[in-house]
Image (cartoon, helix red, strand yellow):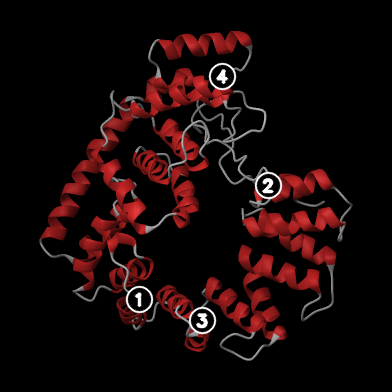
């Protein structure tokens, strides 16, 4: 089972980079970084206000990512639009993507295609790919195939895979399984996980090639090692049916969970603070954490909530008593401005665990966590954003913009 036991989990594991007591020695550095960030932002804003298209685009990016500012797709769209008016290719592309998806409060497929086409004329393969993707989504698969080929010839791996999918299905082009396999192999050989997964499916089915379960398993493992969720599920199918591997139903169930399938697929890891060592869960350790939490320490409150929840978003055997203590501890730590607690609380709102399910509040807390410097919150945001409509995203970001912590944030 080469590589299987080292499959990476979807979220960050516990890290021993810093111990709890060592945080005190680093408390001054976030203030210095914050001051530098504010100065850089002021300079960028001045350039953008003066009409510098590159500065306008960069400011839009910051609002899109929500790293140095509170995420706001509406603000991002406004800055992208100003840069796009000056012909800035990357801004045209981003604004086109916004108009295509409805981010920023305005969905307009025709305008999106116009903007994406204008960006693609600059010749960058990533812009050509985005234009092709939009064309395919609007039903023009033939035109999309031509553009995917152009981007693929320029070395764009995702375009290579997308073109392979069209040849595999015979949409927009004549079906050609040999061509599909060749394209998937080209991208898979360069480490693209989607290509590995799709090529694995072809080998598992014997589609366009001789059936080879062992090759399929190796490809699924390679894609799963990069966190590609469909590969987890496909690998689970191999273990559940003993295709190319020994039968292992418990492992199959775990792989299905990682891939988002099965009754317990929501048992996702609750995000931890990667700067801290794992908390002491012994009775004495829990006593000390509770004392620190009662004294107002947001880190202790976060660790208390995390321990009571077992480090998972949901568990079938969780008691109401544990939830009754864990959720308020996380909420207070989040309201104090502690980023990891914000991220954890956001996960609970999305799952509806210990709180009523609320995507708006879930996204708001993830936006705030990203703003507080929790890098892994970006991965969570990307995972949950597709579940929401643009109006919900806008409301969540507006609430995040008005949030003020009840205590100075602890970074």
Mark 1 or 3: in front is 1
- Asked if the residues shown at circle 4 and circle 1 are in contact, with their CB atoms under 8 angstroms apart, the answer is no
Q: CA distance from mark 4 to mark 1?
A: 50 Å
Q: Mark 2 sits on what residue?
A: 257
Q: CA distance from mark 3 to mark 2?
A: 33 Å
Secondary element under disc 4, as helix, strand or loop, is: helix
Q: Mark 1 sits on what residue?
A: 109
Q: Mark 4 sits on what residue?
A: 321
57 with respect to 387 (left or right): left
Answer few, some or many: residues within 10 Å of disc 4's Cα (few below 14, many 20 plus, some between 14 and 19). Answer: few
Query: Of marks 4 and 3, which one's residue comes earlier in the chain?
Result: 3
In the depicted structure, whether residue 107 falls above or below residue 146: above
In the rendered view of the protein, which quadrant contains the C terminus?
A: top left
Query: Of marks 1 and 2, which one's residue comes earlier in the chain?
Result: 1
- Asked if the residues shown at circle 3 and circle 2 are in contact, with their CB atoms under 8 angstroms apart, the answer is no
Which image quadrant for residue 368?
Answer: top left
341 with respect to 244 (left or right): left
> Looking at the image, which is closer to me, 4 or 138?
138
Answer few, some or many: residues within 10 Å of disc 2's Cα (few below 14, many 20 plus, some between 14 and 19). Answer: many
Q: Mark 3 sits on what residue?
A: 148
Residue sitting at x 75%, y 46%: 253
Q: CA distance from mark 1 to mark 3?
A: 19 Å
Answer few, some or many: residues within 10 Å of disc 1's Cα (few below 14, many 20 plus, some between 14 and 19). Answer: many
Q: Is residue 1 visible?
A: yes
For residue 220, the mark is none
Q: Count of labels shown?
A: 4
């Amino acid at each position: 089972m080469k590589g299987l036991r080292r499959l990476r989990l979807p979220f960050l594991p516990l890290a021993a980079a810093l111990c709890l007591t060592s945080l005190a020695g680093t408390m001054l550095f976030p203030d210095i970084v914050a001051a530098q960030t504010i100065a850089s932002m002021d300079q960028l804003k001045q350039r953008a206000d003066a009409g510098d298209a590159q500065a306008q685009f960069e400011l839009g990016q910051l609002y899109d990512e929500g790293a140095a500012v509170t995420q706001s797709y509406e603000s991002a769209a406004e800055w992208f639009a100003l840069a796009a008016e000056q012909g800035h290719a990357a801004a045209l592309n981003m604004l086109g993507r916004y108009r295509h998806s409805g981010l920023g409060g305005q969905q307009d497929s025709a305008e999106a295609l116009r903007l994406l086409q204008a960006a693609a004329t600059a010749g960058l393969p990533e812009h050509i790919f985005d234009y092709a993707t939009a064309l395919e989504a609007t039903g023009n698969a033939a035109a999309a195939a031509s553009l995917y080929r152009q981007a693929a010839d320029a070395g764009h791996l995702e375009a290579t895979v997308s073109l392979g999918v069209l040849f595999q299905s015979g949409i927009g082009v004549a079906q050609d399984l040999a061509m599909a396999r060749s394209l998937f192999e080209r991208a898979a050989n360069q480490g693209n996980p989607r290509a590995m997964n799709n090529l694995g499916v072809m080998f598992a089915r014997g589609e366009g090639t001789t059936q080879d379960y062992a090759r399929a398993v190796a490809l699924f493992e390679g894609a799963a090692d990069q966190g590609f969720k469909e590969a987890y599920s496909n690998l689970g199918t191999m273990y559940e049916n003993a295709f190319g591997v020994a039968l292992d139903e418990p492992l199959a169930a775990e792989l299905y969970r990682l891939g988002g399938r099965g009754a317990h697929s929501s048992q996702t890891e609750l995000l931890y603070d990667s700067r801290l060592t794992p908390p002491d869960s012994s009775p004495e350790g829990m006593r000390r954490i509770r004392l620190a939490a009662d004294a107002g320490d947001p880190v202790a409150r976060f660790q208390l909530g995390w321990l009571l929840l077992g480090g998972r978003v949901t568990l079938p055997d969780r008691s109401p008593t544990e939830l009754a203590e864990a959720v308020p501890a996380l909420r207070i730590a989040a309201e104090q401005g502690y980023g990891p607690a914000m991220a954890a609380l956001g996960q609970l709102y999305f799952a509806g665990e210990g709180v009523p399910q609320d995507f708006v509040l879930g996204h708001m807390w993830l936006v705030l966590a990203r703003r507080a410097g929790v890098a892994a919150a970006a991965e969570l945001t990307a995972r949950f954003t597709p579940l929401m409509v643009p109006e919900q995203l806008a409301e969540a970001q507006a609430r995040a913009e008005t949030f003020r912590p009840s205590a100075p944030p602890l970074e």
